[in-house]
Amino acid sequence: MSLALTKDPWIAFHKPRPEARLRLFCLPFAGGGAISYREWPAEVPAEIEVIPVQLPGRERRLREPSFTRMDPLIDALSAAMAPYLDKPFAIFGHSMGAAIGYEWARLLKREQGLAPEKLLVSARRAPHLSSEDKHYLLPDQEFISHLREMNGTPSEVLENPELMQLLLPLLRADFELNDTHEPLLQPLLDCPVTVYGGLEDAEVSRDDLTAWVDVTTGGYKLRMFAGDHFYLHDGRDSLIGAVVEDLLR
């Protein structure tokens, strides 16, 4: 199992922990990748095995086409991760990753009767709250301005025309995945849901986060951190500490 994990294109920065009692799958934000969770395996206790998920279209999978619709992505993700659900597991996702995690949890319940011990969602409005966002259709300069406002892409990247030309297809694909996603609320999940957010997040309000209480019968908790939509970078230590506490409590 551990050897397979190291060679799996869907997984990166993994440190096998056969003694762990729980696997934590970590899903990236739009434009991001498994590298966002590169440091997490070394910063959690031995009971937790962190599995950063590497989606197509980025990092080592740069030459593969990115998904632009949620259902095909969830089908492919679920098939790829199936061998690694042989022990208790949890799912963490930030922003786009939270939507992916939610839909994966729904599919697992619907098709396999499985549930994560906890679904951990970060910086994402509850799935049943409507949004008319169509950022992926913006002209390049407006799209880049939106990325700058979100504060998740380094300024040196945004100001490098050659690099942005390489990154724009991935970013647009991820935003299209986000903006065309039409989630369902029913049937409800039955696993506990913990929600994390940034106190200064201009994209996702506290009310947007609180509404996650409606998606599950398994219990709900909200934690807020200093920072904006990408608080998980500057506030990584606080976030990881909270994740560990929530998983091992």
Image: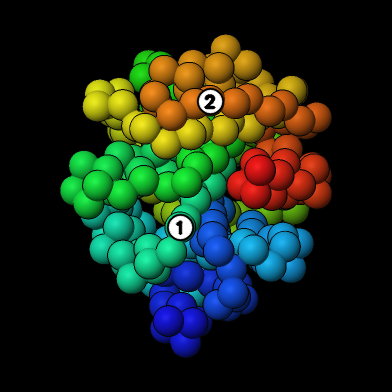
Q: Amino acid at mark 1?
A: Pro
Residue 4, position in %: x, y? 42, 83
Residue 114, position in %: x, y? 31, 49
Depth check: give the residue in front, 96 or 3.
Answer: 3
Q: Amino acid at mark 2?
A: Tyr
The part of the image, by quadrant, that contains residue 145 is top right
Which comes sooner in the sequence, label 2 or label 1? 1
Please identify the residue farthest to the top as the structure is shown.
Answer: 207
Q: Residue at x 61, y 17 (%)?
A: 205
Q: Quadrant of the N terminus?
A: bottom left
Res 220 label: 2
Compared to residue 19, the image places residue 120 above or below, namely above
Q: Residue at x 50, y 33 (%)?
A: 193
Q: Is residue 94 left or right of residue 73?
A: right
Q: Taking the image as drawn, is residue 146 in sight?
A: no
Residue 213, position in %: x, y? 48, 19
Residue 104, position in %: x, y? 34, 46
Marks 2 and 1, how far apart in space? Answer: 19 Å
Q: Quadrant of the C terminus?
A: top right
Depth check: give the residue in front, 192 or 140.
Answer: 192
The part of the image, by quadrant, that contains residue 142 is top right
Q: Taking the image as drawn, is residue 247 in sight?
A: yes
Residue wearing tag 1: 88
Dot 2 falls on a residue whose secondary structure is strand
